[in-house]
Amino acid sequence: MATDRPMQLGMIGLGRMGANLVRRLMRDGHRCVVYDVDESAVRGLEGEGATGATSLQDFVAKLDRPRAIWLMLPAAVVEPMLGKLTDLLDEDDVVIDGGNSYYRDDMTRAKRLAAKRIHYVDCGTSGGVWGLDRGYCLMIGGQAAAVQRLDPIFRTIAPGAGGVEPTPSRAKGDGTAAEGYLHCGPSGAGHFVKMIHNGVEYGMMGAIAEGLSIIRHANVGKEGREIDAETAPLRDPEAYQYDIDVAEVAEVWRRGSVVSSWLVDLLADALARSPQLDGFEGRVSDSGEGRWTVDAAIDEGVPAPVITAALIERFESRGLGRFTDVALSAMRSEFGGHAEKRARPTPPA
Amino acid sequence: MATDRPMQLGMIGLGRMGANLVRRLMRDGHRCVVYDVDESAVRGLEGEGATGATSLQDFVAKLDRPRAIWLMLPAAVVEPMLGKLTDLLDEDDVVIDGGNSYYRDDMTRAKRLAAKRIHYVDCGTSGGVWGLDRGYCLMIGGQAAAVQRLDPIFRTIAPGAGGVEPTPSRAKGDGTAAEGYLHCGPSGAGHFVKMIHNGVEYGMMGAIAEGLSIIRHANVGKEGREIDAETAPLRDPEAYQYDIDVAEVAEVWRRGSVVSSWLVDLLADALARSPQLDGFEGRVSDSGEGRWTVDAAIDEGVPAPVITAALIERFESRGLGRFTDVALSAMRSEFGGHAEKRARPTPPA
Amino acid sequence: MATDRPMQLGMIGLGRMGANLVRRLMRDGHRCVVYDVDESAVRGLEGEGATGATSLQDFVAKLDRPRAIWLMLPAAVVEPMLGKLTDLLDEDDVVIDGGNSYYRDDMTRAKRLAAKRIHYVDCGTSGGVWGLDRGYCLMIGGQAAAVQRLDPIFRTIAPGAGGVEPTPSRAKGDGTAAEGYLHCGPSGAGHFVKMIHNGVEYGMMGAIAEGLSIIRHANVGKEGREIDAETAPLRDPEAYQYDIDVAEVAEVWRRGSVVSSWLVDLLADALARSPQLDGFEGRVSDSGEGRWTVDAAIDEGVPAPVITAALIERFESRGLGRFTDVALSAMRSEFGGHAEKRARPTPPA
Amino acid sequence: MATDRPMQLGMIGLGRMGANLVRRLMRDGHRCVVYDVDESAVRGLEGEGATGATSLQDFVAKLDRPRAIWLMLPAAVVEPMLGKLTDLLDEDDVVIDGGNSYYRDDMTRAKRLAAKRIHYVDCGTSGGVWGLDRGYCLMIGGQAAAVQRLDPIFRTIAPGAGGVEPTPSRAKGDGTAAEGYLHCGPSGAGHFVKMIHNGVEYGMMGAIAEGLSIIRHANVGKEGREIDAETAPLRDPEAYQYDIDVAEVAEVWRRGSVVSSWLVDLLADALARSPQLDGFEGRVSDSGEGRWTVDAAIDEGVPAPVITAALIERFESRGLGRFTDVALSAMRSEFGGHAEKRARPTPPA
């Protein structure tokens, strides 16, 4: 099922995401020129059929004009790379930033490149390590002409309509969203929608994780509690005597439930491997999009308590509230002479 | 693909959920006796092959011993029904509460019925109006023997393993969770897990709805804002100039994205019908499980900020914070002489 | 300034609160009979003028009828004490529970004692270790006649109108609230209002502690951040270069600011002693009232996001979200291959 | 008690805050030159002893060099005013922005003015309409020399040490914080601390308002609830039968309680005037500082759930969550066929 509109694409950044994008494109009949500061990554993809480049100059030289170049880089590296790259490009070339850049940077960059008549397209790319086979959901921003020119690329990378049932009420044939890619608007709109996507992801993850945590601690009535003025009594210990298998719960929720989702699928898999989720410490990173989502909600004045709570929960997981907490203990000590208590010993997760 | 272990089941409560459960059971070869205070509902299912009952006595008489009786009733009606029913039942009969009862009521009821040697099984049933074809996710509590006896019923009602890919890391053949039903533990455990399921549902729904709301208002920079000390200025109006089609965003998220889920599928469908979601006012009900989930989290001392935020968001949607809000305005007026401002006119949703 | 209506009061429970109540009562001319399982506590107050009792029987015998008995005990100890005590009491005696009992227990107990024609008064007592000199704010529930009989006791314990300026818009002479004590309603109403008071306290404390924490970390732009896809970049490090003295900020807020409050006074004192709040670990206890406040808000359907957030923040401070957090890390690992990162080293608080 | 270091100050902006600052300064022996676009405001203060100016040129001309000029303007008007003003000023003049500017603007402005050797001082001013008599809490940023020069002005405006008891653990004589004003750090530090002050204010206000709201609705058990699957049942209506007078509760909390604070004082006054808080609609404005506080918390990675919840609560009060809410209703309708319910009629606040 190769594409009937093969194109050539240059890929800069051959990490997990970049390399898999290249593989998915080549499988579908596109040609790829690849570059990375890590030469072994370049050689690896050469072995799979890509054309490797030894330098940025070499990379640019190997691409047909007008060029199509996809950057798949950490957000902080995009700016210096763009600086070097634009000096080498020509009019009507197009650069796609497929990483997780902040959408406001897209607006600035698109304007800067437009001055040189180079096109800039921002493309939020979701799908993680599974995208090679499953396809990537693409949220695209930029001028219509440039986006249109890249359509064969986007169509190949996206999942296509096949694997998921059509939306019943949707009129047939209107647009590409049902194929898994969408031109969302002008420059920045792609990364804006991807940013919000990640904010939603935070919220959904938080809800699922909290729910399983409440289930996991449904046996809290079996523990003794100390009797003193510092410890909240559990009024109905007999109501918390359940030892429920959270891995089985995650599995059963995969089918027919309202919460069925890819995230539940993934967590069921992790729990199937290790019911205690061994090997994790619970320090949950946040890579920017969640923060920016909350910033946007605040700028717009849109209440987003769920997504915001999920972001703050990640901060708490990393112990960033420590000064707040000691200040609380200090106040309690001042007014009530309350000494701090050791919390119950952390259970094996 | 009829069941090879046909059973007889009595169903009390022939609303949308109860009627569809009966239909799904009969399709698979089980026999059903049905009863409802609404006689027309009984007659309707008779026309589809069920045996109708004209009274509770008649209903009980038409069931073979040991009887299996499923209640599909609003939570508040279960208690009086159980009172009347238990007088008519015999030793070793089993009653299943398939509605959304509070799990603590299950504990009491199971004990009460056990004194008469009647079995009581609580069964959280997820799937809504779609369950007839899609199957229902079942979360079951009660004694193992009674649950085991009902296995052919549960297996038919549940979705089965077919429609969803197996969890990769899961060892084959262990238990029923991969078929979409699970014996979670002793009495109450089924409704406990279903309660938490609904809490998770609140959180996921909140995240999705908020995300689309932030996208929908990405054009807020086009509005003028008043310049006075009462109105938060928008520092970067040029960053909020996007008119993004939220229906298309929901559709594109259905494929390949991290947030893909049945809830996104459903919202995409609603938006496909009406991009403005006309016909809704935004007064979001909560039917108990979300509240109980938060109660449980608090009793256990498990932080659940995301699910809790989603519950509170529903309270806010119904205007229940009004006294809080006037108290805030009163304080602002006291210390700053701030007069209240009319908010920006509510946009068409 | 001794009371012109001296009474006799029996006090059971001579911890910090109970002992100071006795002292404050005796200073104002009331007579006290005191009892505690810790005999040395009894002897200590005997040395200050109280009448000590060697047993519960002795205690009851030393009180004039109708007796007035104040319990100042941990919530979990009230029930067994009441059991023993009521057998010894006579018609028309009154028992005051001055601790932090759950208001629903008051309702049950009042009914039980009423059957023996013994009066039961619930009294929420705020003021902590400072109350001896400052007076205690009293929130009282129970039948009007019993509450009225105890008026001289309440008046002495309460702060009186003196130290605080009158509320300008308040009509003179109406009721006791301006003296620092209030009959809030029937049984349980006192502890209900005290419970909510503590919930408000949680929220105010959280706001103050968070604010100072944000100020304390206003130098975060001086730290280097790692550049990778796991770490949220700080876009404007130059905007976070402040080393601000939080102890001085707390002090300046004590005067003329909108946030001036006793809690800020207390925190300023703690910070004056130790600017880093040494000696605290940041494991913040919660003793029940915060949880019950949120339960009440949920039962009533009143959105209480601020108070609820403050409660959850305390749970987080004790590491109770650990399973949630590992589940989040596990999901991130599944979809993105994200390895967990160590957070920045915890700064000295 | 006139100052022994009289100065001359020019004030631009004679709204409530600006005019009262002038009055407080003149009472203490300082001379003021005043200017406002509203000529009547100028004439009014002339009548109280100030020197009025008819134009910006006139204003600047009437000030002795090096000039000290205080701007008390809405944040959005500061920038154009500074533009016009700086053209008229001379080396070594100092401009104080006493309003609620964003601290990042201070950084920019200070740098711009420094290029002309004009000093710029940012001063967060808290105290509202009460500050004339009570004094204003001042949080100051800028270079030490300029701040030092203005000390007599700040000392007069601030409350002084008198009205509030000293912090017990505080060493005597160190700094001005105990007088109610504080040099917090370099440019922007004053408005940064004021911004956080307002964030804390949001949180404290939210806690107080929510608490009184829960108390006000303690009679919810007296209402009937509908029995259907859409309405969360109230399990214990008998526990919510209290009609508690919230005005009296606010009053009693003013004395001896842990929550005693100026905000409780203010709310008690508002409730004394109108127990139902008539005349307010409950649309609570937010004027920027709360948003910026949350932005700062997120940038710093400091969890601030309480303050954030208070901000979001204000958004909700203005109905800004409407699209979120209709999306929630739409999803519920899709999966469960749930029709929206009218919430219980809004009670008179």
Image: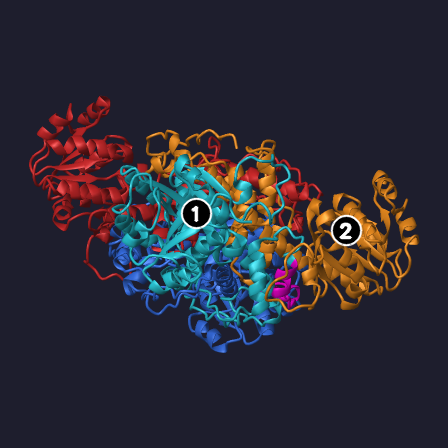
Chain colours: A orange, B cyan, C red, D blue
Q: What kind of residue is marked 2? A: Val
- Crowding at dot 2, Cα within 10 Å, few <14 / some 14-19 / many 20+, comes out as some
Of the pair D267 and D192, the residue shown nearer to us: D267
Q: Are marks 2 and 1 on the same chain?
A: no
Of the pair A226 and B63, the residue shown nearer to us: B63
Q: Is residue B26 above or below residue B344?
A: above
Q: Is residue D103 visible?
A: no
Q: Is residue B200 above or below residue A93?
A: above
Q: SS for tag 2? A: helix
Q: How far across and how far down the image is residue A179, in percent?
A: 70, 60
Q: How far across and how far down the image is residue B232, in percent?
A: 53, 64
The image quadrant where one finds the N terminus of chain C is top left
Q: Is residue B123 visible?
A: yes
Q: Which mark is residue A138?
A: none
Which residue lies under the disc numbered 2?
A78
Q: SS for tag 1? A: strand
Instruction: Identify the magenta region.
Output: B234-252
Q: What kind of residue is marked 1? A: Gly
Chain letter for the residue marked with disc 1 in the picture: B
Whole-angstrom CA distance, mark 2 to mark 1, is 50 Å
Which residue lies under the disc numbered 1?
B124
Specify whether residue D34 is painted magenta.
no
Specify whether residue B242 is painted magenta.
yes
Chain letter for the residue marked with disc 2 in the picture: A
Q: Is residue A2 left or right of residue C143?
A: right
